[in-house]
Amino acid sequence: MLGETDKHAEPAPKQREYASFQLQSLTPHIGAEISGLDLAKPLDEIQLRDLETAWREWKVLVLRDQALSSEEHKALGRRFGTLHSHPMHKMKLRGDDPEVLPVITTPESPYTAGDGWHSDVTCDAIPPKFSILHIHETPESGGGDTLFANMALAFELLSDTMKDFLSGLTAVHDGALPYVGAYKSKPPEGGYPQSEHPVITVHPESGERILFVNSGFTSHIKGLSPRESRALLALLFDHIATTPRLHCRVQWEPDTVTLWDNRCTQHHAVWDYYPECRRGERVSVLGEEAPAGPA
Ligand code: SIN
């Protein structure tokens, strides 16, 4: 979706040198691979600060050869805040531990979780700010990558007129869309969560403006007719899915751990490996505040 927007976003200088580890970027705009850090060991203060800085700079961090137990995985998540309990856990649909989301696809799976552009659980009033996915088993023939998109850059590449228009709008994010619509789960009593968030948010740490609608959860934009809302969301979802410079691609190996910031990225798990298997576990960290729009 380029036009007036057919321009190069001004690249902000990003930090590449860290005391605690080595960092190699995956693309100039999003994603970095870190080596020289063992996530199973408690992070010291310098490692924690470096990891937070790299996370803010690169939005998606990939670490190889991290043989984390579930407890070590949760302990890592807790260094960044309170762990999130997934709404599907209430339905006993996803494992026994509310803080660990099994991510498992087998030949019997009717769907694979996250197979579409989304940010995690935006149906919650305060969605998880971070997610940390540990993949244990990858498909034998390859595949099963995860795509990530930089949603600050997605905002930046819109025309100024579109940015202004979107900045006053609010969207509804509905858990029934993926959990009932795509995953065919029976909703809990009272239904899955539904929340309203600004279409454009401000990242609480970086101050970046973020395009904050996603095809997984966003059902409609308030104040527009159903046709207008459908057309506008289709345009924005198309922008996110078909602008390759927004994206990086993570190729998993057994014991790869990837950390992403849900407040400024979206991701898409690629299910290209049927009938092979892919298994892992995700821990997410609650945000401190509801997503806020520009003042
Ligand atoms: C998800 O958190 O949406 C799953 C991502 C993945 O399995 O790659």
Image: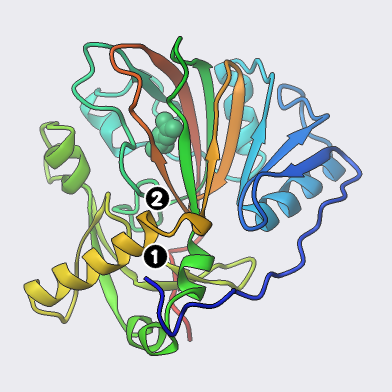
**Residue 3: horizontal and vertical position, in percent?**
40, 80
Three-letter code, disc 1: Phe
Percent position (x, y) of residue 168? 33, 85
Residue for point 43% across, 64% down: 290
Residue under label 2, please give it. 119
| Amino acid, disc 2 | Ser
- The mark nearer the N terminus, 2 or 1, is 2
Ligand 1, seen in the image, is in the quarter at top left
Q: Residue at x 87, y 47 (%)?
A: 18
Q: Quadrant of residue 204?
A: bottom right
Residues at circles 2 and 1 in contact by the CB criterion of under 8 Å:
yes
Residue at x 59% of width, y 74% of height: 8
Q: Residue at x 31, y 67 (%)?
A: 236
> From the image, which quarter does the N terminus lie in?
bottom left
Q: Is residue 70 above or below residue 28?
A: above
- Observer-nearest of 43 and 149: 149
Q: Residues within 10 Å of mark 2 (few under 14, many from 20)?
A: many
Image height of 159 relative to 204, above or below = below
Asked whether mark 2 and ligand 1 are closer than 8 Å, the reply comes as no
In the drawing, does residue 135 fall left or right of residue 22? left
Q: Position of residue 35 (x, y in %)?
A: 79, 31
Viewer-side residue, 263 vs 154: 154
* 3D distance between C-alphas at marks 2 and 1: 9 Å
Q: Secondary structure at mark 2?
A: loop
Q: 64 left or right of 38?
A: left
Secondary element at image label 1: loop
Q: Nearer the viewer, residue 226 or 132?
A: 226
User: Percent from the top left, x then y, of residue 120?
Assistant: 39, 46
Tag 1 residue: 212
Identify whether 131 is placed above or below 104.
below
